[in-house]
Amino acid sequence: MATWTPDPSFYPSPRMAMKAAPETLAYVAAFDPDRKQPDAIAVVDVDPASSSYGSIVGNTPMPNVGDELHHFGWNACSSSLCPNAPHPHMERRYLVVPGLRSSRIHILDTRPDPRKPAIVKVIEPAEVAERAGYTRPHTVHCGPEGIYVAALGNREGKGPGGIFLMDHESFDVRGQWEMDRGPQHFAYDAWWHLGHDTMVTSEWGTPDTFENGLIPEVLLGARYGRRLHFWDLNKRKHLQTIDFGDKHQLVFELRPAHDPTKAYGFVNCVISLENLSSSIWTWYRDGDKWAVKKVIEIPAEPASEDDLPPVLKGFKACPPLVTDIDLSMDDKFLYVACWGTGDLQQYDVSDPFNPKLTGKVRIGGIVSRAAHPSGAGPLNGGPQMVEISRDGRRVYFTNSLYGAIDPQFYPDGIEGWMVKLDADPSGGIAFDPKFFVKWPKSHRPHQVRLEGGDCSSDSYCYP
């Protein structure tokens, strides 16, 4: 009699995932901002015992140019063990890699050689638009029912954006996820509370308002996204909108608690039109509704006009520009990337309503151009896409935000890098001086995914 054995990288609970063996490889999306060479998934050696530690050891170029690889994910993860839709025979094997600009989706097989992922399927934009009605796929999450993809535009590249589903074995596009979207128009990130039958989505804007860079009139006119949406995950219906108010713009990265019994999470607001600060908000259950509370505000730093790019000169300040956050597996530490000032901050969020700053490093930054302890510097760009190892001991990040937006804040062009921090389980972070990946000049690094899963790849159904 045949028996199914679940993929050993699937864990019923976040506590068990924290006991996983350390990752030895990281997969990194790299794109050519000039759109002349194909984008690629780079493979970085993150095994300290290896002779090629901290270097790019593999590179899989895409078949076309101009994709702008952005946020990619696995075909399957720990949610396959959920009791409501179990798929224990699935394996974490394929990377689902969307092109944010091209709307093309690439499926990469990380076996037989994890250092040489092979492209096994390419889904053309016309198929996505025809089957799901969406373009500009942005975020990929493996869920119990399949692969969820949040897309920023409709088939014409306007609004509304939304979510579509893909089959996690055939990779066929199944179709639009929403049954009733209510007032939701802008899309960005999407994640869930599986134990509370709730989907959460956030907002950026329609592709015509960011593909050639942020439009100052749209930003200052408060016409980018500023809302969270809450949905019935099973009925696929919109339940509630929370508007952050017109002073807040760009409500971005959703980081729900990993513990499925907990009904709260964190989201970043990139910029306040009032004072250029960034903020972190906790969403939570309040009676039979959802509510939000601002729990962290990070102020802009005064700066000389001479040191600022044209887009900021009049403000005489450098905004923190918190563009990514990530939550450790035990829900204890929140990492906050300040792409503008160059800070990567660590907060103890054991009490999700009263975070405490426990660590901070600075690298790059619009004004500070801080160096790395390896001697590489002065550096540009700043902490952007953050990823945490399952045991919470290692934090990786890269420095590019988006091809058309990078030069608005770093006019001399971003020279790509990837770094690693060592995190103390009781709080505190420090650079690993031996890990500085200088990126080839032709490309810039963005999303990082760790072999076997990481803190923003999986969701769990057991506490």
Image (cartoon, helix red, strand yellow):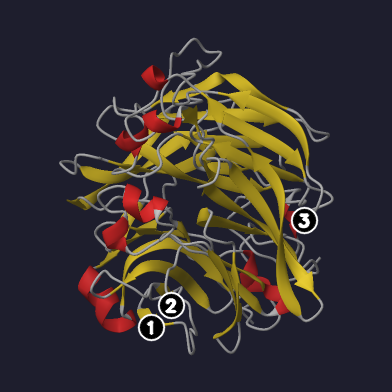
- Amino acid at the residue labelled 2: Asp
Mark 2 to mark 3 CA distance (whole Å):
27 Å
Residue 265, by quadrant, is bottom right
Mark 1 to mark 2 CA distance (whole Å):
10 Å
Q: Nearer the viewer, mark 3 or mark 1?
A: 1
Report crowding for label 1: few under 14, some 14 to 19, many 20 or more residues within 10 A (C-alpha).
Answer: some
Is residue 199 visible in the rendered image? The answer is yes
Report crowding for label 3: few under 14, some 14 to 19, many 20 or more residues within 10 A (C-alpha).
Answer: some
The location of residue 236, given as percent across then percent down, is 55, 85
Please identify the residue farthest to the left as the structure is shown: 36
Left/right of residue 406 with respect to residue 285 in the rendered view: left
Residue 459, by quadrant, is bottom right
Secondary structure state at the residue bearing disc 2: loop
Secondary structure state at the residue bearing disc 1: strand
Mark 3 or 1 closer to N-term?
A: 3
Asked if marks 2 and 3 touch (Cβ < 8 Å), the reply is: no
On screen, residue 243 above or below 364 = below
Mark 2 or 3 closer to N-term?
A: 3
Left/right of residue 170 with respect to residue 351 in the rendered view: left
The location of residue 449, given as percent across then percent down, is 51, 47
Q: Which residue is mark 3?
A: 16
- What residue is at 48 percent from the left and 26 percent from the top? 365
431, 144: nearer the viewer: 431
Is residue 99 visible in the rendered image? The answer is no
Q: What label does residue 167 carry, if any?
A: 2
Q: What label does residue 175 carry, if any?
A: 1
